[in-house]
Image (tube, grey):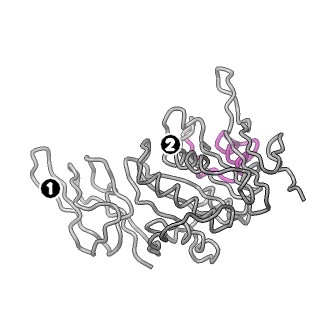
């Protein structure tokens, strides 16, 4: 029996086919159309409907490359189920390398949105109605912000058995039990009954190869766990370290920062993480860990002011 075609926007994608389409968002002041780019792979065989998206923040480009590489290795003829890929959600921000939309709104605080609200609300509504509402699982790809880099990690509701199972399948170095934020895609999708993983890795505006590779491998492992593709042969990856909470160590003075710790390093409470110096190299203040755990994020900015976040430490579950 032939599988039914998949409806999205104004088109239908037949079973065993891939289709690129552009969902209308708005027009620029020049009159040029702005569209949400989407690729649908509608497999010949039945299976889950899953979405993967990136660049909700327009300067977070790692996920765009993750999606490109994942799609390059998939075929609708062999896929079981349906995959909806949205590589660039914040099209306006992506075009100018900005985290935000032109009105300075954070798109990831604007879900589920509204068809007659702000630009952010309209994009959020389009994403929810045309993509999320059709899916049961989603993977939301992010990077660090504000000159910060992140260790590859999954943030999700690890108290939910299915979510935890998929987080374990992704096999990032760390999986963090992260609370839901009002207005986020993850929160709105959960309200619709979807299982959502949020992937964080790398730094904004950069294709960090290690962050891209971990993301590609993780997405493919989740698709395999859902039986949409065959699992890759070879050794199983190391299991993710489950972490229950996390927090940023903040600078207690201002100066030029020199960090002595790297992403993924395990640190002890009270351990020296680095130090602050003045412009002549005189030590102003040391930076110490306020908890025991794993370094999952760090600032890459050399200049810090008192109160700035410098090292993100996740505590083991």
Drawn side of residue 255 relative to residue 185, left or right: left
Image quarter hosting the N terminus: bottom right
Q: Is mark 2 on a helix, strand or loop?
A: loop
- The vertical placement of 227 against 125, above or below, is below
In magenta segment, residue 278: no
Q: Seen from this angle, which residue lies furthest right? A: 1
- The vertical placement of 282 against 116, above or below, is below
Occupied quadrant, residue 45: bottom right
Q: Is label 1 in contact with label 2 (beta carbons under 8 Å)?
A: no
- Residue at 32%, 54% (x, y): give it: 308
Q: Name the residue under label 1.
A: 284
Q: How many labels does the image show?
A: 2
Start and end of the magenta stretch?
105-128
Q: Nearer the viewer, residue 283 or 292?
A: 292
- Residue at 78%, 50% (x, y): give it: 16
- Residue at 32%, 50% (x, y): give it: 300
Q: Residues within 10 Å of mark 2 (few under 14, many from 20)?
A: many
Q: Which of 166 and 267 is in front in this view?
A: 166
Q: Name the residue under label 2.
A: 99
Occupied quadrant, residue 28: top right
- Residue at 60%, 50% (x, y): give it: 73
């Amino acid at each position: 029996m032939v599988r039914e075609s998949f409806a999205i926007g104004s088109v239908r994608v037949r079973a065993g086919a891939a289709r690129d389409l552009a969902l209308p968002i708005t027009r620029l002041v020049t009159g040029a159309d702005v569209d949400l780019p989407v690729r649908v792979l509608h497999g010949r065989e039945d299976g889950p409907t899953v979405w993967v998206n990136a660049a909700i923040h327009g300067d977070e480009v790692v996920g765009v490359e993750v999606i490109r590489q994942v799609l390059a290795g998939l075929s609708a003829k062999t896929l079981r189920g349906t995959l909806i890929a949205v590589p660039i959600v914040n099209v306006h921000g992506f075009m100018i390398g900005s985290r935000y939309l032109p009105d300075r709104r954070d798109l990831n605080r604007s879900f589920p949105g509204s068809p007659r609200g702000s630009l952010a609300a309209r994009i959020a509504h389009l994403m929810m109605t045309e993509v999320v509402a059709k899916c049961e699982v989603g993977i939301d790809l992010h990077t660090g912000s504000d000159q910060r880099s992140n260790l590859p990690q999954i943030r999700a509701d690890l108290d939910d058995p299915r979510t935890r199972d998929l987080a374990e399948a992704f096999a990032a170095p760390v999986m963090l039990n992260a609370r839901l934020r009002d207005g986020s895609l993850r929160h709105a999708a959960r309200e619709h009954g979807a299982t959502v993983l949020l992937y964080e890795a790398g730094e904004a505006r950069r294709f960090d190869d290690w962050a891209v590779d971990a993301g590609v491998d993780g997405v493919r492992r989740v698709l395999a766990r859902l039986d949409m593709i065959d699992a890759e042969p070879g050794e199983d990856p190391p299991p993710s370290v489950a972490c229950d909470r996390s927090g940023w160590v903040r600078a207690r003075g201002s100066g030029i920062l020199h960090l002595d710790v790297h992403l993924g390093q395990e640190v002890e409470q009270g351990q020296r993480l680095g130090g602050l110096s003045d412009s002549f190299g005189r030590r102003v203040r040391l930076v110490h860990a306020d908890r025991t755990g794993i370094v999952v994020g760090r600032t890459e900015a050399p200049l810090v002011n008192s109160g700035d976040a410098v090292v993100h430490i996740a505590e083991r579950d």
